[in-house]
Image (tube, rainbow, N blue to C red):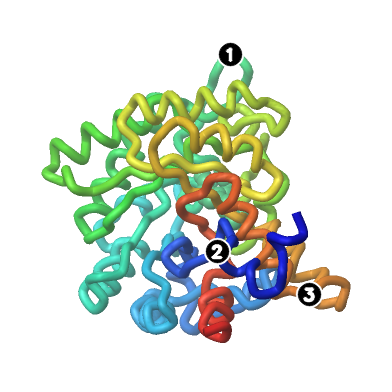
Amino acid sequence: MRRLRGRIIQPLLREQVLQKTDLVAPLFIDETASSRREISSMPGQFRYPPQEAESVARELWDDGIRAIMLFGVPKKKDAQASGAYDPKGVVQRAVRSIKKSIPGMVVITDVCACEYTDHGHCGIVGDTRSGIDLLNDPSLDIMDRIAISHADSGADIVAPSCMLDGVVQSLRHALDREGFKDVLIMSYSTKFASALYGPFREAADSGFQFGDRTTYQINPGNSREAIMESMLDLDEGADILMVKPAGFYLDILAEVRALGIPVAAFQVSGEYAMIKAAAARGWIKEKDVVIESLTCIKRAGADLILTYFARDVAGWLDEKQ
Ligand code: PBG
Ligand code: ZN
């Protein structure tokens, strides 16, 4: 085997090499901010006021990043998440300004209610057999409205992250009916109830006031259920599937890839924070660990990787050439 690893031979035989077009940069747009604010549990990541959305997207574009995922932090929250489908809402405004100035940037929007509800759950809550919980079908209508308003603002891809049953079919019908046949659906199809979303909930101000998300997100130990979730979304018309988080779930990612359509993986806030924290103490080399983590996510089957390191990686890839 070592003949294959000779110094000048090994570059020819490399199976997976990261490219900028593998990456999607998540961005937080905060309607309550007047200037960019660093997120304390995610050093190097910021919440941007809506008027800065275009300029930060431009910086990413100039660095070679071709896709972004937008999350919004609204001024007002209520039980119905009405800010999420407001045509003048924080994400809608950001999408319009970015697409106007950089039409080539692929803009993906997170379709969920948890940043917009006062209780912090991913849709409408109400009484169920087992107490107050997320109501499935009443929440679907809200997701339809959110996705339509994002598409109407110019989003290229909508990404439902609520884990409601039937959401992909519901969105596909709604988008087609409203004339958005070309808007893709990238479903957060296999999303685990992970402790690694902690820093995100600070960043997006989307922590829940009661309960948890285990009645809609998947238990980390359940692999059949995880694959079934992606199979159902494929059947319902998803264009791209997703596994989230990424690094702890590479076995699932490999299986979802085998379903036959493009797959994204989301290296989430907690994965980012862990690498940042260890690197800050000098315990690991940040660049090497980041490149290794993303290369392995790609090897396991990801066509696209959502990562808060997107911009850093773009810079490192430039250094090499
Ligand atoms: C909203 C949403 C979450 C993330 C993406 N979309 C949080 C959650 O489900 O609690 C997590 C992203 C991250 O941690 O980086 N539903
Ligand atoms: Zn949510």
Q: Which one is earlier in the sequence, the residue at label 1 or at label 3? A: 1
**What secondary structure is found at the residue carrying circle 1?**
loop
Q: Is residue 37 left or right of residue 99?
A: right
Q: x and y percent of residue 271 in the render?
A: 69, 57
Determine the residue positioned at 48% across, 67% down.
19
Q: Where is residue 236 in the image (x, y as percent from the top left)?
A: 33, 27
Quarter residue 285 falls in = bottom right
Q: Can residue 79 be seen in this view?
A: no
User: Please, what secondary structure does the residue beneath circle 3 have?
Assistant: loop
Vertical position of residue 11 compared to residue 22: above or below: below
> As shown in the figure, which amino acid type bears the numbered disc 1?
Arg
Mark 3 or mark 2: whose residue is earlier in sequence? 2
User: Mark 3 sits on what residue?
Assistant: 285
Q: Which amino acid does label 2 sit on?
A: Val
Mark 1 or mark 2: which comes first in sequence? 2
Camera-side residue of 233 and 255? 255
Judge the density around disc 1: few (<14), some (14-19), many (≥20) Cα neighbours within 10 Å: few
Residue 17 numbered tag:
2
**Disc assigned to residue 129:** 1
Q: Mark 1 or mark 2, which is nearer to you?
A: 2
| Pointer 3 local density, CA inside 10 Å: few below 14, some 14–19, many at least 20 | some
Whole-number angstrom distance, CA of label 3 to CA of label 2:
19 Å
Answer left or right for 11 relative to 82. right
Residue 172, placed above or below residue 48: above
